[in-house]
Image: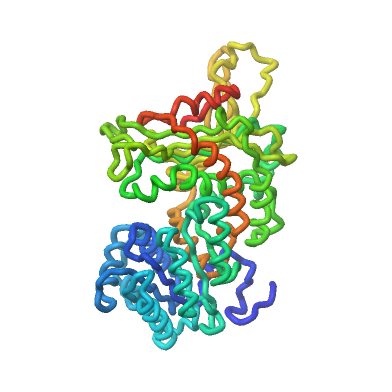
């Protein structure tokens, strides 16, 4: 057993099965009354408390413009969010413990006095809760507000670890910039204020258990890794489909679009995890090193007209209800050319993946909400079989479902019972909900906990963000002079997307 320094002498620090508790610390949430905080962050903090994963000295400190006097209105607000959004059962004893450590500071982002009050409140928590200067700042705010908030934190010394006497970290939500140049400028600003090792760029997809299960699927089994290459794999499809429209995000979405909102971060991260080489360990640096090598090897198609398709939803029917088209949504200009659907074929120029196309697609107002990675294997030659024996047999497939119905499906050919030699596709399924008694934690639970622990394994770094923009920028430049294809709400996207795969002799998998 490896020696320990402090803490429990009977605990092996290498044993990651045991719960890891952060240091006594504060989680400071900017924009704490917004949608993300209400629906995800506050419920995740409650669930962590309910699971016993927060330290006794933990404090949730909210910062917003609400005209609340004292801490009680925010405590009541947080309770309502936890009761409505928590994954685990609501327990009064858990809430009472957590509520005693919830604080609120009123202020706006350009309000010097508000940030001065925030700094004073953090100082006072030293005495009342023993946080020892430790604080993580969660920027649940529009990206355009990042610079002013970061400069306020620099002015007040909130990011100064030496003055605080403990660690200071910042958690930044996507999108991180709107192109490679702006991402680089923002990286420089954040790193100047906090330092690269203290910046946690959050991509909530990386917090999902099914995404992390890719590591186990590939590297803990000898069954898959030997065939995880161009010798056996025909193509890879990564899909993130949403059945909803833009909701109340018209201003943000019309400036951003599907490629910047989803393709640049979620889908390219899933691609990197699917295609990366085996790391020497599960440390943050080694995981990031393998992901960045993969992203740097990504190549765009030379014929963007045929292999980079974008679309915009029109009115249609979804779940038995008639829904608006994108141009009819509230606060969307009638002349908008923003895409709500994006599909692209990418290559990865490595020995493992040379010649294997990676098809990525994302869209809104599609038939169902689903995110999955489908590995399609090359078809067997069927030499012993007559052509009529295999008419219903497709490619072998391994499908990792990220959400919902999290699990893995393996599709392969089997003989149909009877006197004839007829072969058709069958499937074996593994579902997390059936195989394990514990329900899957929300992605934000894992990511908030890791940020408090200082574990950056699931957080993209500067290089990954900028490399992702290297891939997306040429697409955006090409699309700037084009109009998106239209597709009816409730369909699987524009016909041009199906034609893209048909051109290669393939078709999209129907989730």
Q: Residue at x 46, y 47 (%)?
A: 261
Q: Position of residue 398 (x, y in %)?
A: 57, 36
Q: Position of residue 402 (x, y in %)?
A: 49, 45
- Please say whether residue 438 is visible from this viewpoint: no
Q: Position of residue 54 (x, y in %)?
A: 45, 71
Q: Residue at x 68, y 56 (%)?
A: 289
- Farthest residue to the right: give it: 351
On the image, which quarter does residue 94 sit in?
Answer: bottom left
Above or below residue 498? Residue 451 is: below
- Farthest residue to the bottom: give it: 127
Q: Nearer the viewer, residue 185 or 204?
A: 185
Q: Residue at x 49, y 65 (%)?
A: 171
- Please say whether residue 268 is visible from this viewpoint: yes
Q: Where, quadrant-wise, is the N terminus in this rendering?
A: bottom right
Q: Position of residue 346 (x, y in %)?
A: 61, 37
Tell me how the rendering is colored: rainbow
Q: Nearer the viewer, residue 87 or 25?
A: 25
Above or below residue 120? Residue 329 is: above
Above or below residue 456? Residue 130 is: below
Q: Is residue 405 left or right of residue 35?
A: right
- How many numbered marks are there? 0
């Amino acid at each position: 057993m490896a020696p320990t320094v402090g803490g429990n002498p009977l605990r092996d620090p290498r044993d990651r099965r045991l719960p890891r508790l952060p240091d006594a610390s504060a989680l400071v949430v900017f924009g704490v009354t917004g949608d993300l905080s209400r629906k995800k962050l506050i419920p995740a903090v409650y669930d962590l408390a309910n699971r016993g994963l927060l330290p006794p000295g933990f404090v949730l400190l909210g910062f917003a413009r609400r005209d609340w006097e004292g801490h009680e209105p925010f405590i009541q607000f947080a309770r309502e969010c936890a009761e409505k959004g928590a994954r685990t059962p609501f327990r009064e004893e858990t809430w009472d413990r957590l509520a005693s450590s919830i604080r609120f500071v009123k202020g706006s982002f350009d309000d010097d006095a508000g940030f001065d009050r925030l700094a004073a409140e953090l100082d006072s928590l030293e005495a009342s809760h023993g946080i020892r200067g430790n604080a993580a700042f969660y920027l649940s705010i529009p990206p355009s507000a990042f610079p002013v908030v970061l400069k306020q934190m620099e002015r007040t010394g909130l990011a100064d670890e030496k003055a605080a006497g403990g660690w200071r970290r910042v958690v930044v939500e996507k999108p991180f910039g709107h192109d490679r140049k702006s991402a680089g400028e923002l990286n420089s600003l954040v790193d100047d204020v906090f330092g690269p090792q203290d910046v946690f760029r959050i991509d909530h997809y990386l917090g999902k258990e099914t995404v992390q299960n890719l590591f186990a699927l590939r590297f803990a089994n000898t069954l898959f890794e030997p065939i995880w290459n161009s010798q056996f794999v025909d193509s890879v499809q990564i899909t993130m489909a949403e059945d909803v429209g833009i909701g109340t995000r018209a201003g943000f979405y019309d400036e951003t679009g599907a490629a910047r909102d989803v393709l640049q971060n979620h889908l390219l991260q899933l691609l990197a995890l699917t295609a990366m080489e085996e790391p020497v360990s599960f440390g943050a640096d080694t995981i990031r090193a393998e992901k960045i090598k993969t992203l740097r090897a990504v190549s765009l198609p030379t014929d963007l007209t045929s292999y980079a398709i974008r679309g915009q939803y029109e009115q249609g029917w979804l779940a038995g209800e008639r829904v608006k088209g994108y141009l009819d949504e509230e606060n969307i200009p009638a002349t908008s050319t923003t895409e709500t659907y994006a599909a692209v074929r990418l290559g990865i120029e490595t020995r493992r993946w040379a010649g294997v196309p990676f098809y990525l697609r994302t869209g809104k107002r599609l038939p169902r909400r689903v995110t999955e990675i489908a590995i399609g294997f090359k078809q067997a030659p069927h030499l012993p079989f007559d052509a009529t024996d295999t008419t219903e047999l497709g490619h072998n497939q391994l499908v990792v479902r990220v959400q919902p119905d999290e699990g893995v499906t393996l599709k392969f050919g089997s003989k149909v019972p009877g006197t004839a030699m007829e072969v058709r596709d069958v499937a074996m399924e593994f579902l997390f909900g059936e195989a394990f008694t514990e329900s899957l934690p929300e992605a934000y639970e894992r990511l908030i906990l890791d940020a408090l622990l200082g574990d950056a394994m699931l957080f993209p770094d500067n290089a990954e963000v900028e490399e992702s923009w290297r891939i997306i920028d040429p697409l955006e430049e090409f699309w700037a002079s084009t109009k998106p294809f239209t597709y009816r709400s409730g369909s699987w996207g524009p016909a041009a997307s199906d034609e893209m795969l048909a051109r290669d002799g393939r078709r999209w998998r129907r989730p």
